[in-house]
Image: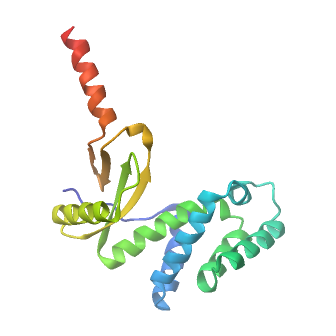
């Protein structure tokens, strides 16, 4: 298997690296990750929050006040809250999703884990998620964190991307293969 690229770069990489180093020094890496995961969940659930984060129309002061209220309500405090406020003050809140992704990469590297992006047609049970983690660990020799995305358009099966390798076992791909084979035969 090709080596997985765990480097982070650009604006989001610099912010994520700074946050990671601070969290590591204060021994709160997992707590910060949990806070960032919770914030990302809020972002995914709320179109208004997404608009607040992405739109350059909001003044920094208004954005900061709104963010403070959201963080207080979500129970996000400490380093994580301060970090998100710094992003806001520096007018970089629009990059928060990329920063969160880069932070996850740094945490995985720190813990000796690798991350797999998995796309499924419907949500997997905990038993199936555990079986998938075990199967991927047997291939990589490392613990594998899963980023699971549900996409009903794949019809069934799953698509796994691990580092530079991708396995597409989706029903959609299989049906397309059959369709192409039939066109060539006819």
Residue under the image location 41 percent in, 72 percent down: 106
Name the residue located 30 percent from the left edge and 72 percent from the top edge: 113
**Quarter placement of the N terminus:** bottom left
Asked if one can make out residue 64 in the rendered structure from this viewpoint, the answer is yes
Q: Quadrant of residue 173?
A: top left
Q: Residue at x 52, y 71 (%)?
A: 16
Check the picture and name the quadrant holding the C terminus.
top left
Against 156, residue 108 (above or below) is: below
Q: How is the image coloured?
A: rainbow
The spot of residue 21 in percent (x, y) is 48, 82
Residue 165 on image: x %, y % = 26, 50
Q: Where residue 93 sits in the image (x, y, percent)?
A: 67, 64
The residue sitting at the top extreme is: 186
Q: On the picture, is 74 further left or further right than 115? A: right
**Residue 161 or residue 20, whichever sits in front:** 161
Q: Is residue 15 visible?
A: no
Q: Is residue 58 above or below residue 25?
A: above
The residue sitting at the bottom extreme is: 26
State the residue in front, 80 or 146: 146
- Among the 4 quarters of the image, the one containing residue 169: top left
- Kindly identify the residue that appears in the image at 40 percent across and 57 percent down: 148
18 to the left or right of 105: right
Say left or right for 132 vs 51: left
Number of marks: 0
* As drawn, 69 above or below 101: below
In the image, residue 34 lies at what x, y percent? 50, 76
Closest to the observer: 139 or 124? 124
């Amino acid at each position: 298997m090709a080596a997985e690229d765990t480097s982070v770069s650009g604006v989001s990489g610099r912010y994520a690296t700074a946050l990671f180093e601070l969290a590591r020094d204060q021994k709160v890496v997992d707590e910060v990750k949990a806070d960032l995961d919770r914030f990302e969940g809020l972002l995914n659930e709320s179109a208004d929050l997404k608009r607040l984060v992405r739109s350059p129309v909001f003044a920094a002061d208004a954005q900061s006040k709104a963010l403070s209220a959201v963080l207080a309500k979500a129970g996000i405090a400490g380093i994580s809250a301060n970090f998100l406020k710094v992003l806001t003050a520096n007018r970089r809140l629009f990059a928060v999703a990329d920063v969160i992704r880069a932070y996850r990469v740094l945490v995985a590297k720190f813990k000796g884990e690798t991350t797999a992006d998995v796309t499924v047609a419907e949500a997997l049970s905990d038993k199936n998620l555990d079986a998938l983690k075990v199967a991927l660990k047997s291939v990589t020799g490392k613990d594998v964190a899963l980023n699971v995305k549900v996409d009903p358009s794949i019809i069934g099966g799953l698509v796994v991307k691990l580092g530079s390798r991708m396995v597409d076992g989706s029903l959609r791909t299989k049906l397309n293969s059959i369709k192409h084979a039939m066109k060539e035969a006819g």
